[in-house]
Amino acid sequence: MRGRVFRSPLTCRCGRSMQVRFPPSPCRWLTLGYYPRLLRLLNELDVAVRPDDLTFSFSRQESRIPYLIYNGLTGLKGLSVPATKSYLLAFLKVIYYSLSFIYLCIVCLLHYHLHFFRRIKDITFEQFCTEYFIPQQFSQEVLVPLYSAVCTCKESDILKYPAGLIVGNYPPSTPTDLDYIAAVFGTRHYTIASPHGFRTVVHALTSSIPRDRIHLSMPLSSISGSCPIYSLHSDNTTFGPFSQVILATPAPISASILPHTRDFLPIRKALETFRYVPVLVVTHTDPSFIPRAPSLQRDLHFQRRIQSPEVKSCKGMVESTHILHYRSPYLRSSQVFQTTNPLRSPQKEMILSQTWFERYLPSLESVRMTREIFSELGQGREGIWFVGSWLAEGIPLLEGCVESAEDVVERMISQKPKLM
Ligand SMILES: Cc1cc2nc3c(=O)[nH]c(=O)nc-3n(C[C@H](O)[C@H](O)[C@H](O)COP(=O)(O)OP(=O)(O)OC[C@H]3O[C@@H](n4cnc5c(N)ncnc54)[C@H](O)[C@@H]3O)c2cc1C
């Protein structure tokens, strides 16, 4: 995950001797259902995970009182609605949201397990909500902001998101094609057990690579040469020669650094159709980003911009604030929050660090490109390969990175006699 850090990552002292370093990496959660390859990799690397069942709440920009609270365990712990006007109204809302959630699960499970509704792979999320009669208020107030936060994009982008990536594709494009809703249903959330989070995974993956072969903070500007002799260029250094190159860079960056030969023209054009959106993550100690009352506080708080009731007019980002100390065994005595896409800035003196990321935003066209170009012809052409979350089916998450990396390794092994 790329990040521009404006201050050094926060370090926090826990207990007597241990120090916990916070972001840049904002990645935190895995679910049993959606991350089979990543969890297997962590197991092979001997990196322990611990259950961390997520709870979250939704509120509107002008209010710090949530209009809905999700109490975890894929809904088994129930929903709650704070009674701001009357207990009866709050009770009716709980019934409405619960029935809508059950209906959505039935549609997704029928699609995922019994392969109903083949059209879903060709439509947007907005079309899915309309055509499959997802209750309107539920989709506006829960699904759209939830996926806007999960995919770190605007609510209007979620409406155009390929429905198949969220609801699942049938027929599946790959044997491991997963449906975000049905695959995580009834499964638990996990997080890396170590206080160092995903740094532990990076260390486990890279510790056997000699240090002089790792070059950080050296953005590549171009690749020169031709198969089987390539050189990689950064502003003032050249690396190589290499016979095979695996690019793990964002698609538009890969397009700009590929050799300028006719062989790569169709691949470069395809790579240029992948769009990325900027994401801001701020770590701070400003408690005004979460509900005041401790009884209303949960792991994550989604705050929406005020908007009109029409789904079509949904605009803007959803701010999500993670209470880092809420359940962490390492942060009992501190108060630290991490807000993604804040609607306003935390007080200056309370900002600990802030980082910009770029995140792939799939469209029906880019998903088609992945299948048509990168599932076969575009991979390994003239010895150049691509990995990253943009190559896998599903919402771009870490599972997609592992899936695409394993796929490239398998293809390289099967071509080994040719490569030698
Ligand atoms: C706020 C936030 C929270 C998230 N939380 C989760 C989570 O809880 N669970 C989860 O599974 N996923 C999460 N994700 C998504 C996950 O981080 C991404 O899906 C994943 O990192 C994408 O990996 P990638 O390799 O495709 O791209 P990136 O991670 O973007 O990697 C691209 C790499 O290319 C490098 N690069 C760019 N330009 C150049 C250049 N010119 N030369 C050399 N290198 C270059 C970058 O530095 C970067 O290291 C989150 C994302 C965000 C933004």
Image (cartoon, rainbow, N blue to C red):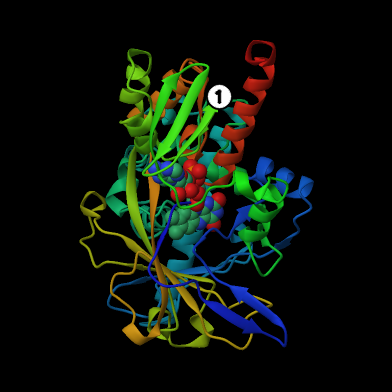
Query: Residue 257's image quarter?
Result: top left
Q: Residue furthest top?
A: 418
Q: Is residue 154 left or right of residue 249?
A: left
Q: Residue at x 43, y 85 (%)?
A: 287
Nearest the camera: 377 or 315?
377
The answer to whether 187 is drawn above or below residue 60 in the figure is above
Q: Does the image show residue 271?
A: yes
Question: Residue 418: percent from the left, percent from the top?
Answer: 64, 10
Q: Does the image show residue 364?
A: no
Query: Residue 196's image quarter?
Result: bottom right
Q: Is residue 201 left or right of residue 365?
A: right
The residue carrying mark 1 is 244
Give amino acid for label 1: Gln
Nearest the camera: 363 or 380?
380
Could you tell me which secondary element the residue under label 1 belongs to?
Answer: loop
Assess mark 1: CB under 8 A from ligand 1? no
Question: Residue 296: percent from the left, percent from the top?
Answer: 49, 81
Question: Residue 182: percent from the left, percent from the top?
Answer: 58, 43
**Residue density around tag 1, few if under 14, some if 14–19, many if 20 or more, within 10 Å:** some
Query: Residue 28's image quarter?
Result: bottom right
The answer to whether 247 is drawn above or below residue 69 in the figure is above
